Image (cartoon, rainbow, N blue to C red):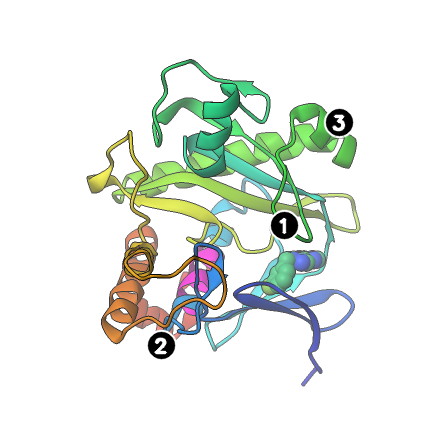
Amino acid sequence: MSPEVHVASGKVRELYALDDERLLLVASDRISVFDVVLPTTIPDKGRVLTGLSAFWFGRTRELVPNHLLAIRADGRSLECRRLEMLPVECVVRGYLAGSGWRDYRVAGAVSGHHLQPGLREADRLPRPIFTPTTKATTGHDEPLDREQAAELVGRQRAAEVEEVSLALYRVVADHAAERGIILADTKLEFGVDADGRLVLADEALTPDSSRFWPAGEFEPGRPQPSFDKQYARDYAEGLDWDKSPPGPELPDEVVAGTRARYVEAFERLTGIPFDDYLGDPQVVML
Ligand code: Q0Z
């Protein structure tokens, strides 16, 4: 076995080096609520995210090549090609939520996209917009307009990531909509391989990198319930907790409800029973 050297930790995942060319991305069962990692884990959450990510890599590889090499039998680890990562987060928004809604209220624009007046929180945008951000090492990512993105990655590459990001959003949002799920927005990360080709990397189109909303409960003008985290958020909101660390423990019924929502998202989006994935994670691979 190749020794695995720890490279980086995210809030809920870990990155290891397998060799000079390959990385191992491991998704834990940790969950963050209001940006704080909770002491309680959600069983199989890492498997749901890993399976979804691998599913999308398989279904979008004609659009753009990606870093996925293999999914491991544990169902939570992806072997990936090691790339030179681009220093921008490629966000696409089809709906007005989160920092997009805040920036629109303040300035009438999001990342340099001027939007019509009178939009409400969570409204669908006339067309999806590309709203890249910096990759903050500490604190929060800062929005970039087209010019700033071009300064960071070059004009051609900036145009390329915009076009590819919008195409990915459209394909996945259409797929999700047919299954009763709104993909409100998503954050994509790209790298460049040794031949200078753009490659989709990191986790892609999971509930941790995207806002998924149940279409049946869509009601613009208010914050939308999250497909996966709403149970945990509602529980945490009902406590006397100031949303600073440490976060609260979740009771068993909140853990079970949250797990069920992750599994439901997996099954609706992939059409594959989650137990089949647990039996053999290769079922998501094309
Ligand atoms: C992804 C991250 C995580 C902490 C580096 N294919 C790639 N090539 C080079 N670098 C990366 C990738 Cl995916 C890369 N991250 C984000 C992931 C824990 C940070 F699991 N950092």
Circle 3 residue: 155
Looking at the rendering, the stretch of residues picked out in magenta corresponds to 47-55
Secondary structure state at the residue bearing disc 2: helix
Q: Can residue 272 be seen in this view?
A: no
- Mark 2 to mark 3 CA distance (whole Å): 46 Å
The amino acid at mark 1 is: Gly
- The x, y position of residue 18, in whole percent, is 70, 73
- Vertical relation: 5 (above or below) 91: below
**Is most of the magenta stretch helix, strand or loop?**
helix
Q: Which mark is first along the chain, 1 or 2? A: 1
Q: In which quadrant will I find the N terminus?
A: bottom right
Instruction: Tell which quarter ligand 1 is in.
Output: bottom right
Q: What residue type is labelled 2?
A: Gly
Which residue corresponds to mark 1? 139
Q: Quadrant of residue 255?
A: bottom left
Q: Mark 2 points at which residue?
A: 279
Q: Which of these two is toward me, 239 or 35?
A: 239
